[in-house]
Amino acid sequence: MGDTTPGDTTPRADPVAESTVPGGGASAAHTSTPPERRRTVPRIAAVVAICVIVYALVVTLYAASGAVRSPNPKEPKPPTGGVTVVLSVESVDAAAQRSDVSVQIDPSEKLYSGNEFALRHDVHVIVSPIDGEQTLDFPAHSAQTTKPVRIFTDGEIGTWPFDSYHADELIVVAYTKSDGVAHPIPAKVWFTGDVPGWRVDVSLKGEVPHAVPSTLVGAVASAPTIDFRATRSSSTVAFAFVLLALLVVMPSLVLFVAITAFRGKRKLEPSFMGWMGAMLFATIPLRTFLPGSPPIGSWIDFTVVLWVVVGLVTGLAVYVAAWARWSLPEAKK
């Protein structure tokens, strides 16, 4: 037994016993890490790592999106006596099923007048089918300008973010006129542009004729067709699923708190009802924050948003029931 002083009934620990405890006796017990903490730290590290990976993935996908993929990686040189028609995609209007494109021409040297800024002859470019006038006029003896056009693109915005829009059999033909007669000229087509949130792919079908047809009808009939397709970029899809996942987390948290309180396993906090109401009112702003602004009635509303609202209201109702069950007047407790 350890030494005791008069009046002191507290037992003293045996020095020998302390020295025989592996790892330094009682001090080792205080410095050892609890098993719960040893399990929690790796879990937190895993959650942080997942968040960092998702963040890096979304940013990387955004940086790689937007560029228009044309059949030619670089703008082709205009053919002798002809032009290169450059179509710059500026935006994709999913709701109107249109794509805004600006058109300009890069003429060959033979089409220029005495200076390199004005055309010798009027040049006309047919872009069809488009919304509006199909023929674009580039007048002679004037500086080059761009012409805005709107391409018809068929698609269904209700399938957002997996919606795609395409224009098939788009043709581009260039010609000049003399004495009122159209004379087709060689034309090459190049698509360019950068549309954030979209992936635009352009492909060419058919072969460019070796000899330019003598008539405009023949030029239109023999012109290769262009397939234009616009889909949501991978960054937009990733953004959408991250935001939808956050929407799903909200009712999960509310239901967990409400059910736990109703079962009496946690102290009832009436102020939580205000937090649940705030979560309910935050659903619609988060819904409208989705990239591309999908219209009300899209598939996400029936599969995600509706059930998020149902879950939040159910959680609020369960918490009110818990309040009615456990929150009694002080006199009756």
Image: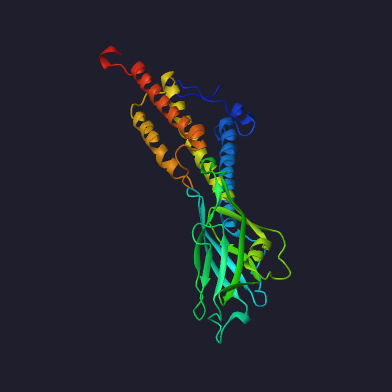
The residue shown at (50%, 22%) is 11
The residue shown at (56%, 21%) is 1
Instruction: Tell me where residue 203 sits by quadrant.
Output: bottom right
Residue 205 visible to the viewer: yes
Q: Residue furthest left?
A: 331
Question: Percent x, y for residue 46?
Answer: 59, 40
Is 203 drawn above or below residue 46 in the view shown? below
Q: Residue furthest bottom?
A: 114
Instruction: Tell me where residue 261 sits by quadrant.
Output: top left
Instruction: Please state if 138 lies on the left or on the right of 315 as rendered.
Output: right
Residue 55 visible to the viewer: no
Image quarter in which the C terminus is found: top left
Residue nearer the viewer, 100 or 265: 100
Residue nearer the viewer, 40 or 151: 151
Residue nearer the viewer, 238 or 230: 230
Question: Percent x, y for residue 321?
Answer: 37, 19
